[in-house]
Structure formats: structure tokens, C-alpha cells
């Protein structure tokens, strides 16, 4: 079965895959709002592609030559599931970013208000010892 751009199920499955991949990239490169939008669109398109019935050939169209029996709907199912997985990953990354910023709001406020490098380094006392190397400002 080839890709048919006129088939809405295949189109949604492809959109879900592409949107999910881009959502992961935007989540990794700290554009959480774009990743949130693309991830939610990918979830919508992927779930609607999986719920839809495969398109039946039009009775007016000429009959296609007999080809080996291929599973109907397999390419779009794979793309839709891949889109759902990548969208879920992107949404988990965005949710974890928002959660960290919410939990350690005092640290991020202190860093944002710091006027000097020393003041920024003194904000690390607001973080737990385990996260100071990950979230804390690096010594220059």
C-alpha cells in the first residue's frame, strides 16, 4: 500500500509522527510551549488515525492490479503509534520542566533577580545538594 495524500487517516498518521518528533526536539531545546502545542496535536492526530476505519476503494475507480496480500492499514498504524509515543515523551519532558520550575520557584526567582555573578552563585543554597550540579549555575 502506497501513501495516499487524499486519505485522511494516512495524512493524520503522518502528521502525528512528524508533529511528535518536532515536539521532542522543541522540548529538548527548551521551547516548552511549542513542544506542548505540537505534542497535543500529535496525540490528537495519532488517536484519531488509530480510531478511524481504513478507506474503502471507490467503486468508480479502476481496479488495481492484484498485488501480494498486504495488511490493510499497517503503514498508518505504525506511524500513528510512533507519533503517540513521541508525543507522550515530549509531553512528559514538558511536564517535568514545568514541575521543576514550580517546585524550585525560589531558586529560579533568586537567579532571575541576581545582579552579580556572586549573587547568582549564592542562590544555590536554595537547591538540594543532589541537584546543585544539574540545575545550579556553573563556576566559570
Image: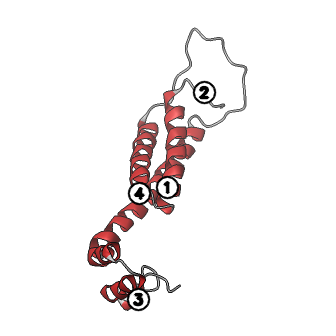
Depth check: give the residue in front, 117 or 29: 117
Residue receiving disc 4:
32
Q: Residue 71, relative to residue 97: is it above or below?
A: above
Q: Nearer the viewer, mark 1 or mark 2?
A: 1
Depth check: give the residue in front, 57 or 3: 3
Q: Residue 87, relative to residue 70: is it above or below?
A: below
Residue receiving disc 2:
4
Rate crowding at label 4 as few (under 14), some (14 to 19) or many (20 or more) other CA atoms within 10 Å.
Answer: many
Q: How is the image coloured?
A: secondary structure
- Left or right placement of residue 105 versus residue 34 in this view: left
- Assign a secondary structure to mark 3: helix
Give the spatial CA distance, label 4 vs label 1: 7 Å
Residue receiving disc 1:
26
Give the spatial CA distance, label 1 vs label 2: 29 Å
- Assign a secondary structure to mark 1: helix
Answer with mark 1 or mark 2, whichever residue precedes in sequence: 2
Answer with mark 4 or mark 1, whichever residue precedes in sequence: 1
- Assign a secondary structure to mark 2: loop
Residue receiving disc 3:
130
Answer with mark 4 or mark 3, whichever residue precedes in sequence: 4
Answer with mark 4 or mark 2, whichever residue precedes in sequence: 2
Amino acid at each position: 500500500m502506497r501513501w495516499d495524500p487524499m486519505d485522511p487517516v494516512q495524512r493524520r498518521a503522518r502528521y502525528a509522527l512528524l508533529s511528535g518528533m518536532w515536539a521532542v526536539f522543541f522540548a529538548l531545546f527548551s521551547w516548552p510551549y511549542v513542544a506542548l502545542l505540537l505534542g497535543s496535536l500529535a496525540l490528537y492526530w495519532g488517536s484519531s488515525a488509530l480510531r478511524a476505519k481504513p478507506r474503502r476503494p471507490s467503486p468508480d475507480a479502476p481496479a488495481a492490479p492484484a498485488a501480494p496480500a498486504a495488511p490493510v492499514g499497517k503503514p498508518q498504524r505504525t506511524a500513528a503509534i510512533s507519533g503517540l509515543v513521541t508525543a507522550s515523551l515530549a509531553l512528559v519532558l514538558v511536564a517535568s520542566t514545568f514541575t521543576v520550575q514550580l517546585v524550585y520557584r525560589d531558586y529560579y526567582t533568586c537567579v532571575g533577580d541576581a545582579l552579580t555573578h556572586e549573587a547568582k552563585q549564592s542562590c544555590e543554597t536554595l537547591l538540594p545538594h543532589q541537584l546543585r550540579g544539574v540545575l545550579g549555575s556553573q563556576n566559570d
